[in-house]
Image: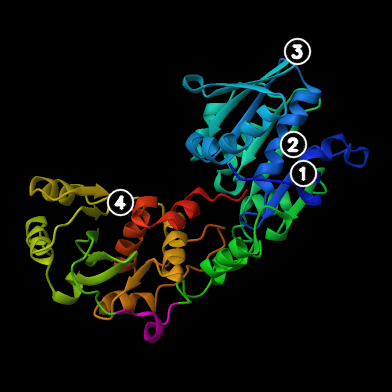
């Protein structure tokens, strides 16, 4: 739980707007902006204070991209603070329900995950007195609109927080740009709005991002993704030599292709840094023939010969190759293929020097110099599907790192802990 000694004026407004006469006509509040700016915490506390003050025996929705992220980002931070304020909080995990009492007043808060378009069906039919949307920009429009439509109790209000995405994103166009006509109070947060954030930690976040990620997560701008994805990487400055052995740990990442190239990366941990020490790259178009699973398995065996590999992280779509590798005795893990999180995590780890590319990885360096954002108007950030095979296996590796692997920054990025 983040230690707080005081709240900033903007945080206090996010908590108390509902009881101020000048905002009596507002039906919603929207808090967006930089990561670690305190918006999630202040909005969440305000939501529970409002519900307890205005309702008794009603139902509310707590919405996140997943129920797991909702528990991590919202409940873990907010419930202990509510208890210190005299609230009684009882979670019934099997029902995804949080019972919150203060004095004689009790309300029920149901947890919903808005992962995809099918999630809208989960919230149909319920009658709500209000809803909180954590990371609203990560949820599909159908889910958010269905949840909003369920808030039909007199006096119900909507509470949104999010980090910025692209300027064509539906939430930016339909809610932030139309906040006044939707009778919504719009509060834009920066890191300066979080008094719990030290100058040292703020500087670390500023160092961790660049380009699009910097403008969104540090400056809090709804900006388009354009240009090179790893625009900060300069081979002459950032390439490393292969570290001397002994290596502490070894992993391999695999992007599998039949018509498209297949790429392997061998990663060696030394002194807290994971080095991409060597690579394998086979382009069937360039070579004029395709390889079978059995041939790629022989190549993988030769590629890892003499190394004690703790994990082989493989493209999850390569089902047949995964089975071949398992039968051959490789310690296989299916890669996490969340593209947007993966790009952010990889960029942050590269910029922080937690992962490094060695100078002999020519195809990796070639792709990094060409790997760019797709120009589109959908509001979704996607890399152009060119020069992306070593980039994909590098992303799979980055997403495999947890706190014990030296990837604490990766964990924070995935959690998008913009409290």
Q: Which residue is mark 2?
A: 46
Which residue is tagged 4? 335
Q: How many marks?
A: 4
Distance, label 2 to label 1, CA atoms, is 7 Å
Secondary structure type for disc 4: loop
The magenta span reads 233-240
Residue lying farthest to the bottom in this orientation: 236
Please tell me whether mark 1 sits on a helix, a strand or a loop.
helix
Relative vertical location of residue 127 with respect to residue 270 in this rendering, above or below: above
Q: Which one is in front in this view, the residue at disc 4 or the one at disc 1?
A: 1
Q: Please tell me how crowded label 2 is: few (under 14), some (14-19), or many (20+) other residues with Cα within 10 Å.
A: many
Earlier along the polypeptide chain: callout 4 or callout 3? 3
Marks 4 and 3 sit apart, C-alpha to C-alpha, by 49 Å
Residue 279 image-quadrant placement: bottom left
**Picture quarter containing residue 285?**
bottom left
The x and y percentages for residue 6 are 75, 47
Magenta stretch holds residue 37: no
Identity of the residue drawn at 67% across and 54% down: 37
Q: Is residue 282 visible?
A: no
Which mark is in front, 1 or 3?
Answer: 3
Residue tagged 3:
104
Task: Point out which mark residue 14 bears.
Answer: 1
Q: Nearer the viewer, residue 197 or 365?
A: 197
Instruction: Please rate how many residues cluster around mark 3, counting C-alpha atoms within 10 Å: few if below 14, some from 14 to 19, many from 20.
Output: few
Which part of the image, by quadrant, shows the N terminus? Answer: top right
Dot 2 and dot 1 residues touching (CB under 8 Å): yes
Q: Is residue 24 above or below residue 312?
A: above
Is residue 309 found left or right of 58 in the rendered image? Answer: left
- Compared with 365, 127 (above or below) is above
How far apart marks 4 and 1 lie (CA) works out to 38 Å
- Residues at badges 1 and 3 in contact (C-beta under 8 Å)? no
Measure the C-alpha gap from mark 2 to mark 3: 19 Å
């Amino acid at each position: 739980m983040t230690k707080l000694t005081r709240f900033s004026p903007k945080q206090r407004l996010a908590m108390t707007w509902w009881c101020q006469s000048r905002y009596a006509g507002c039906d919603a509040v929207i808090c967006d902006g930089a990561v670690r700016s305190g918006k999630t915490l202040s909005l969440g506390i305000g939501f529970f204070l409002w519900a307890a003050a205005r309702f008794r025996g009603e139902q509310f929705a707590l919405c996140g991209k997943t129920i797991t992220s909702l528990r991590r980002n919202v409940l873990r931070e907010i419930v202990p603070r509510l208890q210190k304020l005299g609230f009684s909080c009882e979670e019934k995990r099997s029902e995804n329900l949080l019972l919150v009492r203060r004095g004689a007043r009790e309300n029920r808060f149901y947890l919903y995950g808005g992962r995809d378009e099918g999630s809208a069906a989960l919230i149909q039919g319920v009658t709500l007195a209000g809803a909180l949307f954590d990371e609203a920009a990560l949820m599909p429009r159908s889910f958010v609109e269905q949840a909003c439509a369920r808030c039909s109790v007199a006096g119900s209000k909507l509470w949104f927080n999010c980090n910025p995405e692209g300027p064509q994103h539906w939430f930016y166009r339909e809610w932030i740009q139309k906040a006044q006509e939707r009778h919504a109070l719009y509060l834009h947060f920066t890191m300066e709005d979080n008094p719990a954030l030290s100058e040292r930690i703020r500087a670390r976040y500023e160092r961790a991002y660049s380009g699009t990620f910097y403008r969104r997560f540090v400056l809090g701008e709804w900006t388009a993704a354009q240009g090179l994805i790893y625009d900060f990487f300069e081979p002459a400055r950032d390439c490393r030599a292969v570290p001397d052995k002994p290596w502490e740990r070894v992993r391999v990442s695999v992007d599998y292709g039949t018509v498209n190239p297949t790429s392997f990366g061998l990663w060696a941990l030394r002194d807290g840094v994971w080095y991409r020490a060597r690579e394998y790259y086979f382009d069937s178009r360039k070579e004029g023939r395709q390889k079978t699973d059995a041939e790629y398995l022989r190549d993988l065996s030769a590629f890892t010969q003499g190394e004690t590999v703790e994990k082989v992280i493989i493209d999850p779509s390569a089902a047949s190759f995964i089975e071949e590798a398992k039968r051959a005795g490789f310690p296989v893990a299916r890669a996490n293929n969340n593209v947007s999180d993966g790009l952010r995590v990889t960029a942050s780890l590269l910029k922080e020097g937690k992962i490094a590319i060695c100078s002999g990885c020519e195809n990796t360096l070639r792709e990094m110099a060409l790997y760019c954002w797709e120009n589109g108007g959908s509001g979704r950030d996607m890399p152009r599907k060119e020069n992306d095979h070593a980039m994909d296996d590098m992303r799979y590796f980055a997403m495999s790192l947890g706190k014990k692997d030296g990837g604490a920054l990766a964990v924070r990025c995935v959690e998008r802990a913009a409290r």
